Image (cartoon, helix red, strand yellow):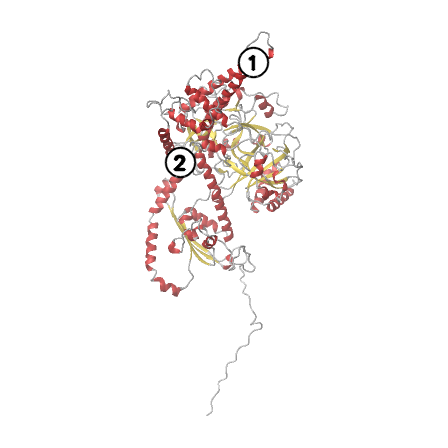
Amino acid sequence: MATDTVPSPQRPRKPPLADWPTIKILTPPKGRYSPKTDEWCVSYCSQSVTGRFYGKEPFCRSICIRKVFPHEVKNVVAFKTHRNIGPDGKAKYPLPSEGQPVNVPRILGGKPAEDPDTASSRSTLEAVKYWDEGWYFWTTTSRLAIHEKTDSMMMDLDQQRRQGERWEQRREVWQDYQDHLQKASTSTQPGAEQTQRDGESSRWWGPIVPPRPVPEFRSHSLLVPLPPDIPPFWERIHKLLAPSHKVLGIFRESLASGEQQEFAGRLWEKAWSNEPFILASRTFTKAYERWKDRDLPPDADDGKTGSTTASSNHHHTSHEPINIKRRFAFCIERGWHFALSLSPTERPTVESALPPMASNTDLNDFFASCIAIAAQQVGGQSPISPTPTLDEDDQDIAAPRSRLSDSYPAAFTDFYGLPSNPPCIFKTGDAWPVRTGPEAQRILREARPVCDHPMQDRWPDIGQLICEHLDSRDVEWSSIDPVRFAEAGKEDVSALYLWIGVIPGTLVFEAAKAAAEGCKDILAREGFPDVEVAFRESVVTQSAGPKLLSLDPSVDPVPELRSPFTPTLGIQIAPLGTPYYEGTGAVYLRESSQSDRVFLLTAGHVTRPPPAHRNQLLSRKHGRQARQEIVVLGTNAYTDAINRMMSTIGHDLLSIKTWDEEFERLGPVVEGEAPRRTRARKDYEDLVEKARRRIEEVNEIHDEVTKHWTTPNQRVIGYVVHAPAIAVDDGPKHFTRDWALIDLYRDKIDWDTFQGNKVYVGGKISSADFILKMHPHPEGRSDFKYPPGGLLQVRGIVKDDEIRKSQQLDANGEKCLIVTKNGKTTGATLGRLAGMESFVRRYPENGIKKTSIEIAVYPYSNKDGAFSAPGDSGAIVVDSKGRVVGLLVAGAGATEETDVTYLTPYWWIEEQMKEVFPNCCLYEIVD
């Protein structure tokens, strides 16, 4: 039988090169971002009437779904090259903290945090989770987290990682700052004063630097990866996980009920109020009082602060006032243990040196404690007029020499001699001369202001271009100051420099050089190729009962000790709730010429320090809000004022003893003795009598202030009536809106002796030095007179044109406006006002950069030290005629010393104040 055969189908031929290996290339669309949607977010917020009335946080929920594409975590041809590639070929971009296992619930795959003392480095690395290709689920109940999530949508994974590292660094700096505040808040404990002297002075002052860390909202957020899409497997285990789903649903409903949200909101509101600080202060005060009542010996009898235990025949009875024991404890705090630690032969004796009034044991004990405090200060700063010094060895030890000097050898010589000795990262132009040899000393240099440069009129616009260029290169700069430099005491000055400060440790030599070249290109394009550029490391910081006493330096024997307790300008103030944040009062104003209401102007961050208060408007024009009261003399200022009194008495007692010995050595009066011996005997008698009178006067002031000024509540002088939120003005000038008005209580001022707006410029500066330095050039000096009693009357305002183009001449014939101020920390100082504005950069909350324009003041000379220091914020700066120049708001330096002081011009602040109080004016001149 024949059969039909079916032909086999013919196999198609393979295309050419079909068996060759192939490479799959994923090319993303053109442009930086893919047009495909990679994240979806749904946010919902609501607010109740009650919540809005009390300013509570709104009720918020947000859910996001994120798709991570391959090119975001892998190197893809024609896209970009990722760094830090792991063995699996994926980039190591760590998940944010809310996605790490230690912050994820155990039921969702989280793991407990391991003990850092026992965990190995390997387990630590394995515990970190990184972004991977796939889907992610994110949710939060925090309003701040929603804002941060929206901002992160503009960043890739690498940028998000860098932002997280910056936030973590800010948290570490903030913790260091909080440790400093903890030390400051416990400065009243026994022995704390000695510890603070032995340790280095804190670098922190001003409440906005260091910037506050980003609020911790991660605990309200959750980020988990979604499992891959495996429907069959999911269907099979769906029933198995049904009970867990039910538990999670119940748990979520409990969270969504609002009770936890309400509780968290109340906690958050309380944390931002001043109640925790007040509670802590009261608790510490009560505990301290109980300690003194329990531990004081029964024979503690004294009538003066600083005395030791009385002799055995003076016993403390139950009906004696409690302030005797307080004074005894105060003496212990102030260092009496130093005197007790001496052997009987080493202990200073005062019997031969005490004035006649010291006839009883209690008073002798008080004088002995004064000598003990004076002895502690031997070799240190003067108790009345501390002078900054330069310790080259200390600076060498502290400076990170290898990090900077290896790339730029002149890092620690270019700007040596300025108050903080800021290290130079890079400088354009010719190298400056240096001394050579094994024992060669570094050349001291000074900063000189610029008032007559051709670039001055165009500087605001050019400066803005410089700011934008630095930002484009990710330079974390803090200030841009136009300045010239000169060797200390010499006339020759350098070319104009744009002196750019950067956050320490954030700019390397190569990046500084490249940024400087870009700045030079801008300057050359604008027609100023001779202007040079220099980078240095620098930080900008914001500088902080009975009637007040009167002050008349013409008749008061010790005006420098009396002035802290008077309303004279330079008045030292602090918030009652946080008295360890201290600052200075500026000028007095009337609400109107017909009103008896008197205000005191100061910096806003002095009255409402950001670490303790929200940065928001406070206005009590109509009296509906709780009063935030202000005290004269904060915690440290009051302690320092008392110590200066006791130290002054101690120095005078020791001097009296020495003069008495010299007087005895001259022997009795002999007929026909040499006139020189007679004059010497008379001189010693006059010195002893003058010292006795000074001791009596200081003792009288000490009695007054320790009896009526001990507690902060006794030192309240008024309350904050208006304080705008601290911000950079959005007008054309971009000055800092950082001011506040304090409404003074009428019964706290003796208006019969009130001197008004007079700045005390005496004490540290002699009358001759004040005249010669305020008018260093002979032209104009003949018409200038020293203010009576050292009280410079404030009259008038220096306008913008004169600030920028002063006609006054310095000793070298250069145009320069000489200014003065009296601040809490540095007292009366002199400085040189810059004619060209400075650009100042701050990095506050949430990484938002703020650039303001400030008026700069440089130190008068290398020998005169810094113009200001922490605690001087709020002080008013005036010229030799008493005209107001500006309000001191900040300073810049590489250490706690200040190289540049920044002012907000008063003419602009007055415009802002008149928007609130249209008829306010400077307090009238008092003759």
Q: Which residue is located at x 43 percent, y 16 percent?
A: 359
Where residue 352 is drawn, which disc sits there?
A: none
Q: Nearer the viewer, mark 1 or mark 2?
A: 1
**Relative image position of residue 404 (x, y in whole percent):** 59, 43
**Relative image position of residue 886 (x, y in whole percent):** 53, 31
Q: Residue furthest bottom?
A: 1
- How many residues crowd around disc 1 within 10 Å: few (fewer than 14), some, or many (20 or more)? few
Q: Nearer the viewer, residue 442 or 1?
A: 442
Q: CA distance from mark 1 to mark 2?
A: 61 Å
Disc 1 marks a residue whose amino acid type is Leu
Q: Nearer the viewer, residue 654 or 781?
A: 654
In the structure shown, which secondary structural element does the residue marked by tag 1 occupy? helix
Q: Is residue 762 above or below residue 260?
A: above
Q: Nearer the viewer, residue 35 or 577?
A: 577
In the structure shown, which secondary structural element does the residue marked by tag 2 occupy? helix
Q: Which residue is mark 1?
A: 666
Q: Which residue is mark 2?
A: 277
Q: Is residue 452 above or below residue 32?
A: above
